[in-house]
Structures are given as C-alpha cells and as structure tokens.
Amino acid sequence: MAEWRRMSAGDLGRAIGRGEIDPEELTAAFLDAIRAHPQRDRIYARLTEARALEEAAAAAKRARAGQRLSLLDGVPVSWKDLFDTAGTATEAGSRLLENRVPERDAAVLANATLQGLVCLGKTHMTELAFSGLGLNPMTATPPNVHDPALAPGGSSSGAAASTAFGLAAAGIGSDTGGSVRVPAAWNDLVGLKTTSGRLSLKGVVPLCARFDTVGPLTRTVEDAALLLAALEGAKPADLTAATLRGARLMVLETTALEDLRPEPKVGFTHALERLKDAGAEITKAAFPDLVEAMSLAGILYTTEAYGTWKAAIETAPEKMYGPVRDRFRAGASHSGADYVAAWHRLDAIRTRWAARTARYDAVLVPTTPNLPPEAARLESDRDYFVTENLLALRNTRIANLMWIPALTLPTGLPATGITLMGTAFGEARLLRLGAAAEAALR
C-alpha cells in the first residue's frame, strides 16, 4: 500500500477502475499515513476523516457496480483551508477566523464531490493567502519536501506538502499572485494557475477577488487536467499525442530573467535545452509594458486586500503575523482614484500583451528567481522576509496581472520550476503543451 501514496491521481483512478485498488483501503492508507507522519500537524490543519471514509465507501460501491462517476472517483485529495467545507472549520490560516464553520461546501468542492473525489482534510496555509513564502507563525508553517527547515512556498503551502510527502494524491489550492505555482516549484510538483473566472470562487475565502483563482498542485500534468475537470464538473482536456514539434515558445526577457539565483538559472536553461531538443522553436522577446504593470500591482493587490479585510484586521491586529499584517495595511495609502486609474492602465496593458504574444503558443519564464529560504531566518529578519517574498512572487505575478493561465513544471533541478503561460481560457491548449514539455523534461 505504501506505493499507492507515490502514484499519480490518474494512475490511482485507473487502478480503481480495473479493480486493483479498493477506494476504502486507499483512503484508509492515506489517513493512516497522515496520522503517523512526524510533520502531520504542520501540513494538515484538520482531517475530515468521517467524511473521507463515507465518500470512499460510496466510491467502492460504485466501482463494484461499474458506475464510477469519473476517472478520479475514489481518489483522495487535500483542500487548502480557505475552501468552505460544510460542518468543518475553515479558517484560511488566520486566527481572525478561528472557529468559523461554514454551512455548505465551496462550489469547487461540491463539483469535485459529484465527480467522486474523496476529501481527506484541510491543509495549512499563509494567513488569508497573502504571502508567497508559506511562513505562518500564527498557526503552522508546513515543511518543504527537500528540508523541513526551508520555507515551503505559499500560500498553498500545506497543499504542496500534502502532495509532495505522499499524504494526498493531489492538493487543491488557490493562486492570487503565485500561491499555487511557488509551492509547486519549491516542492518539485506541477501547479496550474487557471484563468480568473474559469473556476467558481463561491465559498472560497477571498484575498483579492479580481485576482483570486483556484488550481491544483499535482504530480503530473495529466493530474492537473483531471483535477481541473473535476473542479468545474467538465470533461478533461485530451492530452493524447501531445507534441512540442513546431511549437512556438517565447522566453520573456523583460523583468523575468533579472536577479536569477544560480540554481533557478541553471534549471531554466537546462529546461529550455530539453524543450528545444524536443522540437520547440524558442525565441527571446521583450515586453516593456510589463514594467509598468508590475508597478501597478502594489496598488491593486493591497488596496483590494485591505478593503476586504480592514475591519477584521483592525479589530484584532495582534492576531496577525506582523509582516503579513503590514502587507495588508499598505493598501490604506492608496486613494480610490489611484485604484481605478491603475485598473484602467492594467486593462490597456493586458490588451497589448495579448497582441504581442498572439503568435506564440506559450510564454516561458523561470517560476521563481530564488530557492526556498530558511524559515527561521524569515521569522527573525523582517527585511529578509520582504525581499524574498517579493522576489518569489515576481515572475508568477505576471500571469495574474495579464489574466492568463500558467503551468509550472519541475525542471529536474530540485526546487526549481519552468512556467508556461498561455492565453485566457486556453487551459486545454496549455495543458497539451505542458504534457509534451513534461515528457521532454523527464
């Protein structure tokens, strides 16, 4: 049974379909592994054991009757603790929301349940999802799979850890500025950031609703496609015969290649060589307008985040970790006129981005310019926290600003990723390219 915990979600589903794995035994194996794991309390905020066993029993009956709901029917996954779970506390990693118990599931959880997925429990995360590092001294900081003392990446930190440590077949997270892709890259996983508006945010604790997205952290691109389908209740993208031959890929020179630490630079360069060997046509190109777009992020993110959470924060500011609280409060310095003007500017830049990149199948960047830093130093050195957090989120934020989907893949060098960015609502095409890139990188 130990090998089950290292199988992809798709392979687990196929084994269930062939009668080789019983969903009840599979779920019990994951729950037993979670309870026995030395880092369990840093990864899971709480388990939904009774629900998981009940859902697994139902999946087992459907499998025996030949009435499975989807390929992933009976496969256990974890959920970031900002997805509402009926009757189970959902606190978004914040002491401000202690004992918050929703009455119904988030829409994406409800969709996944209708596809037969098993809910193992809720994973730890950065407070209210506002950090790319995964540090949370107020509740728990999940471990990095390479070294428990390193930052896991955030804010979907527990989602990444649950998958990387084999304590879930996949993790469901959210991404506002990189919160799926940073932890995926730092834990050698696949992470899919979906187009804003593609997946429902109903029942998802918000950070910045105009940037918030839902996405999976998985072991394979196929799993990302299968989970996307489950989250929206649709058919998965067809990845058969995916190829890079003739694919036109643009390496973004503006901003994304600056200040790369040695390992991410080597990993990215190595990945580009593999993609080129597989038949991709790779061109380097600039997009100068990105500099202005990045400068607008501070206004747009902090203003909306603070506007959403000001009352709760200022009622009990001592319940928040200082650097995260300070990021929220930065939004108080911007006027309504500044905020509206920034959105007008960003909308215009998005239009120019679409025109500039239209001839390419995907745009490539290193997922993060830096490696996971030591969590202890982040806690003790506030300036270090700020600089590493901004650097970690710099490249991932591009896709959020440009309103496009993005897929990060492991490069083969530990804790480094390469990101493919597509076109708005073009997840199927992006996943096909990703599947071909994954094969080339392996």
Image (cartoon, rainbow, N blue to C red):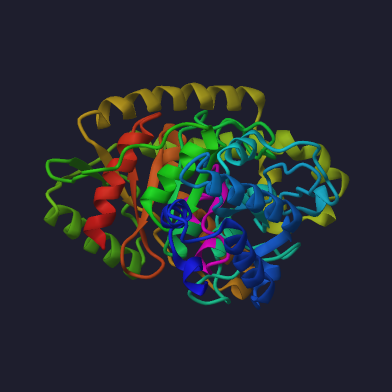
How many badges with numbers are in the image?
0
Nearest to the observer: residue 327 or residue 59:
59
Q: Is residue 442 visible?
A: yes
Toward the front, the furthest residue is 65
Left or right: 280 as drawn, with respect to 294: left
Coordinates of residue 422 in the picture (x, y in percent): 33, 36
Compared with 401, 101 (above or below) is: below
Name the residue at 57% across, 34% down.
300
Q: What stretch is highlighted in magenta?
A: 163-182
Coordinates of residue 399 in the picture (x, y in percent): 42, 39
Image quadrant in which the C terminus is located? bottom left
Q: Can residue 177 be seen in this view?
A: no
Left or right: 93 as drawn, with respect to 161: right
Nearest to the observer: residue 183 or residue 432:
432
Left or right: 306 as drawn, with respect to 30: right
Coordinates of residue 145 in the picture (x, y in percent): 51, 71
Compared with 260, 291 (above or below) is: above
Name the residue at 13% across, 45% down.
245
Q: Does the magenta stretch include residue 302?
A: no
Left or right: 267 as drawn, with respect to 22: left
Nearest to the observer: residue 185 or residue 239:
239
Name the residue at 58% across, 47% down.
117
Compared with 173, 289 (above or below) is: above
Name the residue at 41% across, 43% down.
225
Task: Give residue 112's quadrant in the image.
Answer: top right
Compared with 158, 343 (above or below) is: above
Task: Give residue 402's quadrant in the image.
Answer: top left
Q: Does the magenta stretch include residue 169?
A: yes
Coordinates of residue 83 in the picture (x, y in percent): 67, 43
Nearest to the observer: residue 216 or residue 73:
73
